[in-house]
Every structure is written in C-alpha cells, then in structure tokens.
Image (tube, rainbow, N blue to C red):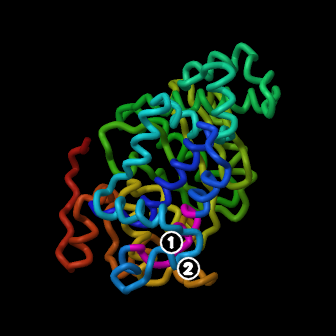
Amino acid sequence: MPAHNETIEAIFDEIADLLDIKGANTFRVRAYRNGARAIGELGTDVETLIQGGTKLTDIPGIGEDLAKKIVEILETGRCEFLERLHQELPSAITELLKVPGLGPKRVKLLWHELHIQTLEQLLEAATAGRIQQLPGFGEKIEQKTIQAVRARLARSRRFKLAVAARYAEALVRILRKAEGVDEVAVAGSFRRMRDTVGDLDIVVSAQSSDAVMNDFVAYDEVKEVLARGPTRSSVVLKIGLQVDLRVVPHESYGAALVYFTGSKAHNIAIRRIAQEKGLKLNEYGVFDGTTRIAGETEESVYATLGLPWIPPQLREDRGEIEAALSGQPLPVPSPQRRK
C-alpha cells in the first residue's frame, strides 16, 4: 500500500521522539518535528505534489535529508533510519511514549534513571512511589501515570462481542434517559461487529453534557473513573472493560460516528479523499476552510466525499472504498461476526 502524508508525518514524529530519548542534538530533533508538522499541514498528498513538479525542498521545513527520507518512504513504505533507531533502543520504549503525559523527555528520564522499559515496570515503579522523585514528575503526575498505564494494560485484554454487548446495551439505555440527550450509539470495533473488542466507544449527541456525564460515571458496573470532562469521560468497568464516552453537538453527531466507528486504515483513506477535494475531515464534520459543510449525519459526510453510505461492518479499508468510488454495489455485510 503506498505511503501518504499521514504515514510520513507519523514516521518523522516517531524519529524525533526516539532521537530525543537518545539525547541527540536539539536542532536535529527539531528538524524532524518541523518536518512532521510541515507534511501534516499540507492540503495535498506529497506524491501528487512531486508528480506536479514541486520540489520537496520547496516545502518549508523540508531539507535535503528529510526529502531523501520522504522519497524512500514513498517508494518502499519504510524508513531505514527509523528501523535503525528501533534496533538501538529497547523495543518497548515506544509503548511508553503512548502513555498520556509521558513525552520523550520523561521517557528518557524513566529509562536512564530507573531503567524502566515496559508498561509493567512503569506501573510497578509508580505504585511504589519511585517516579515522583524524578525531576518534572511529582505526586500528581505519578497518580495520573498509574491511571493511564492501568488503562492501557486493560485495553490489551479483549472481550467477546456478546459479553461487551451486555454492558453496551445497558449503558445505552441509561444514557438515552439523561436530560438533554438526543442520540446515543456505540461505535468502534463493536459497531463493526468484530468477534472481540478491546474497549467500547460511545458517541452521544446532547444539548448539555453535565447530566449524561453524571449518569455515565455513576453506572453501577464502573470500577474506576479514569477521566471526566465536558466532552469526554473514560471509565473501567468491574470486568476490566474500558468505556470511553464522547459528547458532541447535534451538527457533529454523524461525523463523530464515522470517525469513531471506522478502522484506522478506513479513516485515513477517507481523510485522504477529503484532502484531495481541498476539504478537512475530522470528528466534528467536513470543513471547507472554517465552514462546516457536513457532519449531522453519516450519510452527509460520505456524500460530501463522493461516496455512498458504507455499512459499519465494511469499514476496514479492504476494498470497500474503491468499490464505492467505482460505483460497484457494496457487498452485503454478513450477519456472522468477523474476526
């Protein structure tokens, strides 16, 4: 599969993180950060720009070295330099970078000062009160780290769809009764009817979020509240299943469902279509500049991209988008759950 802007941006960001952890020159780290941002902000695919005669070095923030790596990524889908960095650092270091609040500087401290390389080691050190003694941490950050690591470890466990359904259906019934709620749906791999799910993503359209958030965290199967805010809250249920709730305005409900239902590959593919049309697609809608032109329904989002509505079970980037673009009839999703 050819690489696109999102892939290049992610590779440059990861290189910057790993170089930072290694203690590389600040200017070199910044060059990759700037390069990632420059590619991420482009409204057109890099490959399309090259085919149109644009030199990569004409893009602000892209020098000769980064330009060569972009060509390598476009041609091979890989970056040899990133692979070399992976070999030079402990394999689990990248997992630490995914913990909220742990940037490369803190991961570097954890690695060098406490020899922490895995999530399990991080949880053990944090619960023992050892990481709060490091510069830039403290007790508050230590407690947030404990919550975040427990959440990540819980997400690694998967639950049969039928088991997750019992909790999903109960939560939907509760949230629909909350004051100000218009619509409620369970998204993610649950809505795609995968055989197992790692967590539940619930999307709510509501005039006000206070009541629905109160009812969500008060659900009697909640074991731990990981986070609570005006638009997003996360809990872990007694069985270990994490549930994330997102509240959006009515005009963004369809866009949020599209965003939180599709697989990562499907979402990248439809965002690329939006970019090619000069549009921006996110969980709040489809935007032409700063003007939202679609988002209230899923159908409006797909129609704006020139696509028919794609059933949730097909949103895996396994040929469904190509079939829709060519006008071919989409396959009827099988009632049998897919792995």
- Left or right for 327, reference 157: left
Q: Which residues are magenta?
A: 35-46
Q: Secondary structure at mark 2?
A: strand
Viewer-side residue, 219 vs 264: 264
Q: Which residue is mark 1?
A: 281
Q: Residue 128: give x, y in percent of width and height.
A: 71, 13
Location of the N terminus by quadrant is bottom left
The quadrant where residue 326 appears: bottom left
Q: Secondary structure at mark 1?
A: strand
Amino acid type at mark 2: Phe
Q: Residue at x 53, y 68 (%)?
A: 63
The quadrant where residue 150 appears: top right
Q: Residue 305: give x, y in percent of width and height.
A: 40, 79
Instruction: Give the numbered dot on residue 287.
Output: 2
Q: Residue at x 51, y 40 (%)?
A: 170
Q: What is the count of numbered marks?
A: 2
Q: Earlier in the sequence, mark 2 or mark 1?
A: 1
Q: Residue at x 44, y 69 (%)?
A: 271
User: Is disc 2 in contact with disc 1, using a CB cutoff of under 8 Å?
Assistant: yes
How dense is the environment of label 2, judged by Cα within 10 Å: few (below 14), some, or many (20 and up)?
Answer: some
Cα distance between the residues tagged 2 and 1: 6 Å
Q: Residue at x 49, y 60 (%)?
A: 9
Is 119 part of what is drawn in magenta? Answer: no
Viewer-side residue, 123 vs 136: 136
Amino acid type at mark 1: Leu
